[in-house]
């Protein structure tokens, strides 16, 4: 039985949620922008469970082996069959509407499998860039649906105990739950090893966050409203060689990685607080806030 506290579950949620960006990035390159804009990704919850049968529903099993440094592990992702048929149809140029007929075709599985492999390639690159550690997944990730002879054995043989639910909404109406299954103890160990969790301070940190929340509620807001903070917006980033830098001159153009109409990052005193879009106000540039970063996410950056 896992010994993860609610605080540790929240930290694991936030850490794993960061890799949702890989899904968004890969999908944005694979499908039409007008279709992609109708997709919304949200991490819903994480929980410890004991009975794998309660998660069966109408899901396929995606078994993934990984190596992080010298340690090996595994995870499982449960995808609804209807989601796979919808995404596969969109990838092949369709509208994704009313395409699920109660089972998956080999073409749908192959199209979706190719997408998942690209997502994990992106996660590998992001992980190495952020944490300076290697993370390798099995070369070709297999998807096992309910028509496979091995399906029951694969599903009921899952021994992982931590479920992280992601909700994907399409067209503001269809909601699909994608469940990531992990070993809770290995997840905790990995977070400690990467410095995201400090083992000896876990209890203190939980108390500290509770104290901070209590403290904020007792502050007289009028006492701090006149405090000035610096607001800045990051339009995008670019990585160029030293040779290119030395060759810069008046009129040179450096291409940024932000796409047109995409959200930009807003900082308050250097801390990310929101996402926004650029607008023009009376011949001046301004920004329109589109998303506020939650307090929990901001606490991670402090």
Image: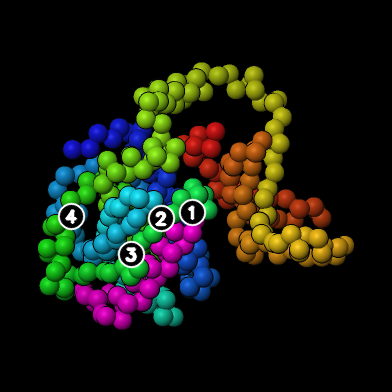
Badge 3 or badge 1: first in the primary sequence: 1
- Local packing at callout 4 (Cα closer than 10 Å; few below 14, some 14-19, many 20+) is some
Residue position marked by numbered label 3 in the rendering:
138
Residue placed most toward the observer, 177 or 245: 245
Kindly indicate whether the residue at mark 1 contacts the one at mark 2 (C-beta within 8 angstroms).
Answer: yes
Mark 2 element type: strand
Relative vertical location of residue 7 with respect to residue 114 in this rendering, above or below:
above
Q: Residue at x 27, y 55 (%)?
A: 74
Q: Earlier in the sequence, mark 4 or mark 3?
A: 3
Q: Nearer the viewer, mark 4 or mark 1?
A: 1
Q: Mark 2 = which residue?
A: 135
Please give the name of the residue rendered at 39% of the width and 39% of the height, measured from the top-left corner.
193
Q: Quarter holding the C terminus?
A: top right
Real-space Cα separation, disc 4 to disc 1, in angstroms: 28 Å
- Nearer the observer, 171 or 210: 210
Q: Any mark on residue 158, and which?
A: 4
Residue in front for this viewpoint, 231 or 162:
162
Badge 2: residue crowd in 10 Å (few <14, some 14–19, many ≥20): many
> Residue shown at 39%/59% (left/top)?
136
Q: Are marks 2 and 4 in contact (CB under 8 Å)?
A: no
Q: Is residue 55 above or below residue 210?
A: below
């Amino acid at each position: 039985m896992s010994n993860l506290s609610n605080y540790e579950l929240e930290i694991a949620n936030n850490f794993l949620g960061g890799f949702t960006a890989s899904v968004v990035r890969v999908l944005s390159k694979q499908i039409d922008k007008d279709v992609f804009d109708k997709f919304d990704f949200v991490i819903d919850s994480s929980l410890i469970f004991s009975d794998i049968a309660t998660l069966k529903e109408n899901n396929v099993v995606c078994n993934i082996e990984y190596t992080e440094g010298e340690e090996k592990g595994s995870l499982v992702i449960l995808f609804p069959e209807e989601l796979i048929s919808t995404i596969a149809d969109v990838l092949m140029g369709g509208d994704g509407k009313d395409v699920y007929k109660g089972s998956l075709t080999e073409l749908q599985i192959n199209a979706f499998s190719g997408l998942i492999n690209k997502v994990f390639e992106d996660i590998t690159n992001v992980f190495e860039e952020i944490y300076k550690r290697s993370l390798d997944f099995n070369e070709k990730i297999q998807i096992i649906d309910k028509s496979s002879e091995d399906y029951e054995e694969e599903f009921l043989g899952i021994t992982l105990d931590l479920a992280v639910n992601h909700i994907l909404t399409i067209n503001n109406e269809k909601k699909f739950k994608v469940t990531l299954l992990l070993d809770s103890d290995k997840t905790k160990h990995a977070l400690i090893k990467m410095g995201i969790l400090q083992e000896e301070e876990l209890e203190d940190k939980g108390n500290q966050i509770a104290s901070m929340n209590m403290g904020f509620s007792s502050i007289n807001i009028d006492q701090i409203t006149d405090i000035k903070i610096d607001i800045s917006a990051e339009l995008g980033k670019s990585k160029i060689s030293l040779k290119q830098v030395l060759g810069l001159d008046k009129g040179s153009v450096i291409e940024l990685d932000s796409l047109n109409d995409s959200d930009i990052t807003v900082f308050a005193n250097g801390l990310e607080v929101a996402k926004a879009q650029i607008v023009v106000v009376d011949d001046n540039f301004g920004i329109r806030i589109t998303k506020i970063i939650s307090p929990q996410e901001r606490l991670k950056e402090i």
